[in-house]
Amino acid sequence: MSGDQSRRRVGIVGYGHLGQYLVQRLQDEGPRHGLELAFVWNRDADKLKGTVPAELQLGKLADFLERCADIIIEVAHPCIAQTHGESFLKAADFMVGSPTALADSKTEQKLREVAQRSGHTLYIPSGALWGGQDIQRMDEGGLLQALTVTMAKHPNSFRLGGHLGELAQRAWQGRAVLYDGPVRGLCPLAPNNVNTMAAACLAAPSLGFDGVKGCLIADPNLPDYHVVEVEATGPGGFSVRTRRKNPAACGAVTGAATFAAFWSSLLVCQGHGGRVYLC
């Protein structure tokens, strides 16, 4: 561990709502959990002024090595993992807050290989995925035959362009299915909206992004929460379905409970070696 041997140094990449939440909790509660803030980077550096101490602001992301972080958390955009993930993993553990980045097969393969070589862990936060550890155990035991993740939100809670964006806007008159198919095809179309689906794909590598099915729904009758349904199927007629209601302000991309889930994930991010680990 670099820096103070008694504390694990955390770098935050991205300062949107989730980044701000993590920074605040690290400042308020980090020391008693053996954590301290190493740096905060944001594409718009002005957003950090007045809220993040100057000595913790990182001007250029390429200079992250100077801050000796033990774990780097991306909560910005999938392009960060695709562009900088390899460098991060060579130096530290890396939590990918936008796992849709790994729907690109080359990125996933590269980061898996770097994690194995470096001995650092590529952490995938569960976020809004309920039962992720159970899915992972089924997959590891060769028992997972099919997995479907259905996400439903208010039309205003999507950040979509192109054809999906048009479909979402038309959904004001009633519930509309925006996409139904392999998660790999959906991730590039909705990179900021389906990280829960991507986490499920990484929990079930035997199925992966091509085998896990995703269904994305816009529903004007969901003004103050998101719904995530997960259905796992195994041998002999086994199946389990969960339905999670995640409170969310109208127009919010991320549900309120997901913020606390990220913090819980961070608290277990240590000692898992060179692998991909759902936390």
Image (spheres, helix red, strand yellow):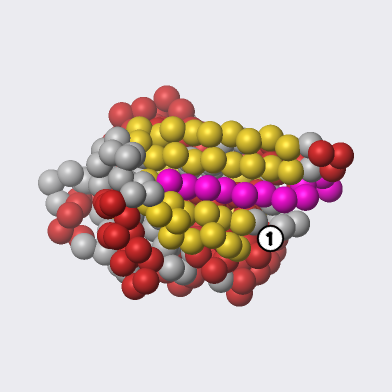
Q: Can residue 152 be seen in this view?
A: yes
Q: Where is residue 86 in the image (x, y as percent from the top left)?
A: 54, 68
Which residue appears farthest toward the top when viewing the image?
Answer: 32
Residue 116 position (above or below residue 32)? below
Relative depth, front residue between 95 and 71: 95
Q: Residue furthest right?
A: 236
Q: Where does residue 239 sit, x and y in percent of width and height?
A: 73, 37
Q: In this view, does 37 lie to the left or right of 82?
A: left
Q: Would you say residue 82 sits in the magenta stretch?
A: no
Residue at image point 61% right, 71% down: 105
Q: Position of residue 229 (x, y in %)?
A: 54, 40
Task: Name the quadrant containing residue 257.
Answer: top left
Work out which residue is located at the far front of the displayed protein and give it. 173
Q: Residue at x 39, y 29 (%)?
A: 31
Quadrant containing the N terminus in the rendered view: top right
- Residue at (62, 49) in percent of width and height: 148
Indicate whether residue 143 is drawn in magenta: yes
| In the rendered image, the vertical position of residue 28 relative to residue 273, given as above or below | above
Query: On the picture, is 49 further left or further right than 122?
Result: left
- Percent across and percent down for residue 168 are 33, 59
- The secondary element bearing badge 1 is classed as helix
Q: Measuring 44% from the left and 39% from the top, which residue is drawn there?
A: 227
Q: Is the magenta stretch mostly helix, strand or loop?
A: strand
Q: What residue type is labelled 1?
A: Gly
Q: Residues within 10 Å of mark 1 (few under 14, many from 20)?
A: some
- For the residue pair 88 and 96, the one nearer the viewer reads as 96
Whether residue 74 appears in this view of the structure is no
Q: Give the range drawn in magenta.
A: 142-152
Residue under circle 1? 211
Residue placed most toward the observer, 141 or 229: 229
Left or right of 156 on screen, residue 80:
right
